[in-house]
Image (tube, helix red, strand yellow):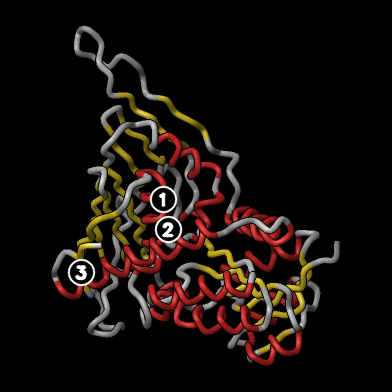
Amino acid sequence: MASLKVLVVGCGNMGTSHARAYHKLDGFEIVGLVSRGSKSRERLSNELGGTPMFSDYAEALAISKPDVVSINTYPDTHFNYARMALEAGAHVFVEKPLALTVEEAQTLVDLAQKLQRKMVVGYILRVHPTWAKFTEMAQELGKPLVMRMNLNQQSSGDHWHTHKQLMNSMSPIVDCGVHYVDVMCSMTRSKPISVSAIGANLSDEIASDMYNYGQLQVRFEDGSVGWYEAGWGPMMSETAFFIKDVIGPKGCVSISDQDKGASDDVDGHSKTGSLKLHHSKLDAKGHFAKKDDIIDTADEPDHDGLCLLEQEYLLDAIHNDRDLTDHLNDAVNSLKIVLAADESVKTGKTVML
C-alpha cells in the first residue's frame, strides 16, 4: 500500500513531535513543512533530511496535494486550516482544541462526515497507556467520584512567549482543560450538567480581559464532581503543580508526581512515574483492611512516543475506515465544557449545560 502524503503545518513542539512520528512510520511520507517563521521549519527540515518547506499554507496545500494535513498551529487557525484541508480532499489531524467555538467545531465534524474524510483531534492522553489505566481504575471506585486535577506551568523565555501567544485567543483552562475534562467524562461516563469557574489576570503582558490563572468546577448527572486548575507565567508556583487524583466510595487512585522536573517541561505534562491505589475498606477493628497498591509506570512512552501512538491511530482509522463519530463528538463536548467555564469566569455565574 502506498504511503500517505502528509503536509505538516506548524513546526513548534507539537509539530516537531508529530513530524518525527510521520518520518518514522512506514505508512506516511512528509511532502511539506509549513510555518510562518523560517527558523523552526528550517531546523525541522534539516532534521528530516531536507523536507520541502513553505511559508504560506494555501500555497503548500495546492502544490503538495497531500492525503493528510497535520495541523499543529495556534488554536485561532484550527478552524480555517482544517476546513481548507477537508475541502481539498485531505484527511486531518488537528491538535486540540478543534476550534475556538462549539459552532465551528461542529461545522468541522459535519464537514468531515459529509466528505467522508477522517479527522482525529490530538487528545494525547487517550493513547497514553498509564492514563488509560488511571481511567480504568477510577471507574472501579464506585460513584460518585471526586476528580481533582491541575497543570500549572512556571514559564519564562520562549515558553512564556508561546503562552502569551496562546492567550491571544484562549485562557489556560480552555487550552489545557479540554484534555482533563475529556478524562473526567471518560471516568464518570455521565453527562455534565453545570460548570462554574474563577480566574485572575496576574500579568500586565496580556490583555486586560484575559486571565492566565483559572479553575473550573464541573458537576455531573450521577453526582460526581471535578475541578481543574491551570496557570501560566513566570509568577506561577511549582508547589503541587501536577495533581491528578480521583476519590470514590471504595478509595482513591492518584498519579505520582515524583521526579516531575520543571513545570514547563512538555514531557512532564503526561509523565506519571507511578499510580497509587488506596482502598477504603476497614477491618473489624476499624483499621484499613488492605495496604495501598503502587503500580510502577517507569516504562511509559515519552512525548515523541505518545505522538507516534496518535499517528498510528490516525493511520489505522484511514486504512481500516474506522468510525470516529464518538471521538469527534467527545471533542465537541469537552470544548463545550471548557468554553462554559470561560463564560463563567467572565460573568461570575454558573453555566447550566
Q: Residues within 10 Å of mark 3 (few under 14, many from 20)?
A: many
Q: Amino acid at mark 1?
A: Val
Q: Nearer the viewer, residue 160 or 276?
A: 276
Give yes or no for contact between labels 1 and 2 (Cβ–Cβ under 8 Å).
Answer: yes
**Res 180 quadrant in image:** bottom left
Q: Residue 339: x percent and y percent?
A: 31, 70
Q: Residue at x 41, y 40 (%)?
A: 256
Residue indicated by mark 3: 344
Q: Residues within 10 Å of mark 2 (few under 14, many from 20)?
A: many
Residue indicated by mark 1: 183
**Res 102 quadrant in image:** bottom left
Q: Which label belongs to residue 254?
A: none
Q: Earlier in the sequence, mark 3 or mark 1?
A: 1
Q: Residue 274: x percent and y percent?
A: 47, 37
Which residue is outermost to the left? 348
Residue indicated by mark 2: 179
Can residue 173 be seen by looking at this rendering? no
Q: Amino acid at mark 2?
A: His
Q: Secondary structure at mark 3?
A: helix
Q: Earlier in the sequence, mark 2 or mark 3?
A: 2
